[in-house]
């Protein structure tokens, strides 16, 4: 790894976060943060995907309408794509370890994670649609899924974007972290 810059305003000081770290140190920190985020998302995806895989082996599965079976197939495919995207950063990191490409690894892993979150949103909505259609047998299922989809969007995307807009590039007074200048895409 690179040497730590000396002095308060050295070339290694990130002007946006005020941290004094080399590019490699920043990539290591960002990788650790990303791993913590992935652990939360992967656990939920694994539980959801396990549930989806078990559904087809239940006796009532044969009673599903063609529409519900199609929703099920789409949901399983979305769940598979979600798992691939959220596990992908681990494979990416493992294959590139030792090649002095940590900053690029963090960039691509972050992109895969954002894609995985988008796919997870679709998987959750599709799963809810399937379950609520079977449970309610009426149009209320669509309204409930629509309401939940809005709630997911607000929690996962609107609140973070609102915080960014509200902060408007100012450095937090509590010393919290702002996006790093080295981040290729600090937006959510």
Image: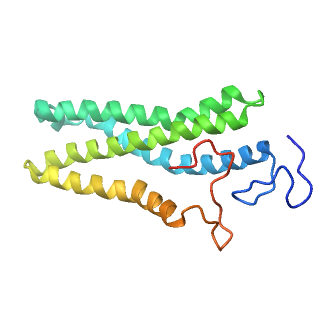
Residue 177 pos. (x, y %) = 65, 61
In the image, 32 versus 132, the foreground residue is 32
Whole-percent x, y for residue 183 in the image: 64, 45
Q: Quadrant of the N terminus?
A: top right
- Which residue appears farthest toward the left when viewing the image? 138
Q: Extreme right residue here? A: 6
Give left or right: position of 186 versus 144: right
Residue 34 position, x and y percent, is: 61, 47
Pick the front one: 163 or 120: 163
Q: From the viewer's perspective, is residue 59 above or below residue 5?
A: above
- Asked whether, in this view, residue 78 is left or right of residue 104, the answer is left
Q: Is residue 101 left or right of residue 109?
A: right
Can residue 57 be seen here? The reply is no
Q: Nearer the viewer, residue 100 or 181?
A: 181
Residue found at x 60% / y 51% = 36
Q: Position of residue 25 (x, y in %)?
A: 78, 47
Looking at the image, can residue 49 be seen? Answer: yes
Numbered-mark total: 0
Here the colouring is: rainbow
Residue drawn at x 39%, y 59% is 155
- Residue at 62% across / 38% down in the picture? 107
């Amino acid at each position: 790894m690179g040497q730590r810059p000396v002095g308060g305003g050295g070339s290694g000081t990130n002007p946006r976060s005020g941290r004094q770290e080399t590019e490699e140190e920043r990539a290591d920190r960002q990788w650790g943060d990303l791993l913590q985020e992935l652990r939360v998302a992967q656990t939920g995806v694994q539980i959801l995907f396990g549930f989806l895989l078990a559904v087809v082996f239940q006796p009532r599965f044969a009673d599903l309408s063609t529409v519900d079976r199609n929703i099920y197939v789409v949901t399983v495919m979305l769940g598979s794509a979600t798992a691939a995207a959220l596990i992908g950063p681990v494979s990416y990191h493992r294959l590139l370890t030792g090649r002095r490409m940590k900053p690029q690894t963090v960039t691509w892993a972050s992109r895969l994670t954002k894609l995985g979150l988008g796919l997870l949103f679709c998987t959750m909505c599709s799963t809810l649609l399937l379950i609520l259609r079977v449970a309610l047998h009426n149009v209320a299922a669509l309204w409930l899924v629509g309401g939940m989809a809005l709630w997911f969007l607000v929690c996962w995307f609107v609140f973070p974007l609102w915080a960014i807009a509200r902060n408007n590039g100012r450095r937090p007074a509590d010393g919290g972290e702002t996006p790093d200048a080295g981040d290729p895409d600090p937006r959510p």
